[in-house]
Amino acid sequence: MSSQSSKIVLITGTSSGIGLAAAVSAARAGWTTVATLRDPSRSDALRKAAAEAGVELDIRRLDVTDEASITSAIDGVLADYGHLDAVVNNAGAGHLGTLENESVAEVRKVMEVNFFGVLNVSKAAMPHLRASGGRLITVTSVGGVIGQPFNEAYCAAKFAVEGYMESLAPVAAAHGVSVSVIEPGAVATEFVANVGVDLEQAVAGAGVYAPQLSAYVNRTVAQFLDGAQTAEGAAEAVIEALTADQPAFRLQTSDWARGFVGTKITDLDGSAVLGITNGWVA
């Protein structure tokens, strides 16, 4: 891969789902794609997808919670290619829980991966993005706009990312860096499985909140089974942010996501949003 003839994008969290699809799509769009993941031994699906698409990926280790790992990955990209034109913050972890049934330490762990991990990567990359007039793209969620039951910690992290990036955007733009956030809804990926809980056991251990958690789990599983978009479809918004002449700050990945997020924009007193989410736990 040439160090100067194509633009260089680094993408985190590419072992599956949107990150995998975005890495393959970016390479197909002509970008030299550095596809990173915390555990390189989990790269089989990524390598298979790249081979099937007939594209080449530069696969490297990067753990967003390990600053030394981030520094090593970005320094390696600069050493090998001489520049960095875009970063896609995609790495993240799901979480299911509610205030009384989880520890503050668990909430901190969610924030560490989903919020501080994004900041760690973005901070390390920003000097190089300024040098290239590059792009900083972060995959958040509709849960970064609308709080969702039993997702308090996850939504708090995504809200934080959205607020941080929205605040950073004009500052970065003054120095030639475009900032965008991508807001998926339900995506048919391994994300639900990656929440890492036994749903039946979680309901059984939910105490007074068991009926509400059961209702939420049943509703959410049905949504993911019946109405989720593909990871490839969601990745299209990432590629739009990567390639558009003037990318929007906020891009939803589907009509459903646009409608859902749109509810919040005009909901001055919060009644419309809570009218929806109250029904999820009824």
Image (cartoon, rainbow, N blue to C red):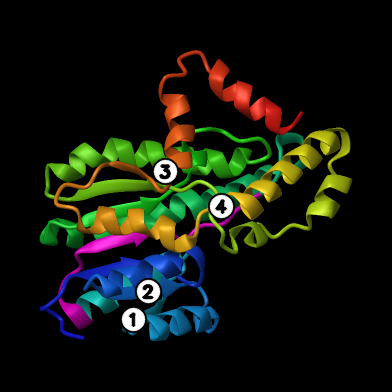
SS for callout 4: loop
Query: Which segment did they paint magenta?
Result: 80-95
In contact (CB < 8 Å): disc 1 and disc 3: no
Q: Amino acid at mark 3?
A: Val
Residue 71 visible (yes or no):
no
Q: Amino acid at mark 2?
A: Ala
On screen, residue 253 above or below 189 = above
Which circle's residue, 1 or 4, is located before the other in the chain?
1
Which circle's residue, 3 or 4, is located before the other in the chain?
3
Q: Which residue is mark 2?
A: 35
- Magenta span main SS: loop
Separation of marks 1 and 4 at Cα, in angstroms: 27 Å
SS for callout 3: helix
**Residue 155 x %, y %:** 55, 40
Q: Which mark is residue 161?
A: 3
Separation of marks 2 and 3 at Cα, in angstroms: 21 Å
State left or right for residue 2 relative to residue 223.
left
Q: Which residue is mark 4?
A: 228
Q: Which residue is mark 1?
A: 57
**Figure quadrant of the C terminus:** top right
Q: Which mark is residue 238?
A: none
Q: Amino acid at mark 4?
A: Ala
